[in-house]
Image (spheres, rainbow, N blue to C red):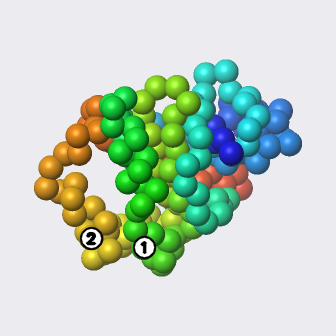
């Protein structure tokens, strides 16, 4: 299965969503603007980003908080990164507020995405402060993994709910 995403204004993304009603597009908004995300083998974005879903758990929800860890990987380090995620500890799935997890391999470029969806940003913060998080990330606090082509960065979004946004 493939995953696809693109950025734009919410109005533009709503137009895309209406045009492709056969697909389940999730609309989100964050500090960088809007984002549309969907999972299907069909590609509809002309300037989007396409991924292979390597690891998937949980079900994407219409409401929630999204955090994306963007990990640029060296070409030599891709296998190591993928292998590490295939063998990962799955404690995140048992945390209160967890909704979905996706490990996305880029079809073009070198930036992998680790997407997690939470019921709220507070649930995500609780995960980050947990002993389970510290244990899962202990090796990364010692040194930067050799497979990093550049410094990883995170982006965060809140699922766009039209009724709530229209009331503002």
Using the image, determine if residue 88 lies above or below residue 17.
below
Q: Is residue 50 left or right of residue 81?
A: right
Q: Residue at x 55, y 55 (%)?
A: 55
Q: In whole angstroms, how far apart are the C-alphas of marks 1 and 2? A: 10 Å
Tell me the SS state at disc 2: helix
Using the image, determine if residue 80 lies above or below residue 140.
above
**Residue farthest to the right?**
22
Q: Percent position (x, y) of residue 4?
A: 63, 37
Q: Is residue 63 left or right of residue 138?
A: right
In depth, the one of 133 and 97 nearer the eye is 133
Q: Percent position (x, y) of residue 25?
A: 72, 45
Tell me the SS state at disc 1: helix
Using the image, determine if residue 90 lies above or below residue 147.
below
Q: Is residue 31 visible?
A: no
Q: Give the residue number, with chain letter if any, for mark 1.
A: 91
Q: Which mark is residue 135?
A: 2
Using the image, determine if residue 49 lies above or below residue 56.
above
In depth, the one of 52 and 125 nearer the eye is 52
The quarter holding residue 85 reads bottom left
Q: Residue at x 15, y 49 (%)?
A: 143
| CB-based contact (under 8 Å), mark 1 and mark 2 | yes
Which quadrant is home to the N terminus? Answer: top right
Of callouts 1 and 2, which one flags the residue occurring earlier in the amino acid sequence? 1
């Amino acid at each position: 299965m493939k995953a696809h995403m693109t950025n734009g204004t919410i109005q533009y993304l709503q137009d895309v969503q209406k045009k492709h009603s056969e697909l389940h597009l999730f609309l989100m908004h964050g500090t960088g603007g809007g984002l549309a995300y969907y999972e299907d083998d069909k590609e509809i974005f002309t300037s989007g980003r396409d991924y292979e879903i390597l690891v998937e758990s949980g079900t994407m929800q219409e409401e929630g908080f999204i955090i994306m860890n963007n990990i640029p990987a060296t070409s030599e380090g891709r296998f190591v990164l993928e292998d590490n995620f295939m063998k990962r500890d799955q404690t995140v799935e048992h945390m209160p507020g967890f909704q979905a997890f996706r490990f996305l391999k880029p079809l073009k470029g070198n930036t992998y995405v680790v997407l997690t969806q939470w019921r709220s940003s507070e649930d995500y913060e609780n995960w980050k402060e947990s002993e389970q998080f510290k244990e899962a990330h202990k090796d990364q606090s010692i040194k930067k993994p050799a497979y990093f082509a550049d410094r990883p960065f995170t982006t965060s979004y809140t699922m766009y709910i039209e009724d709530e946004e229209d009331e503002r």
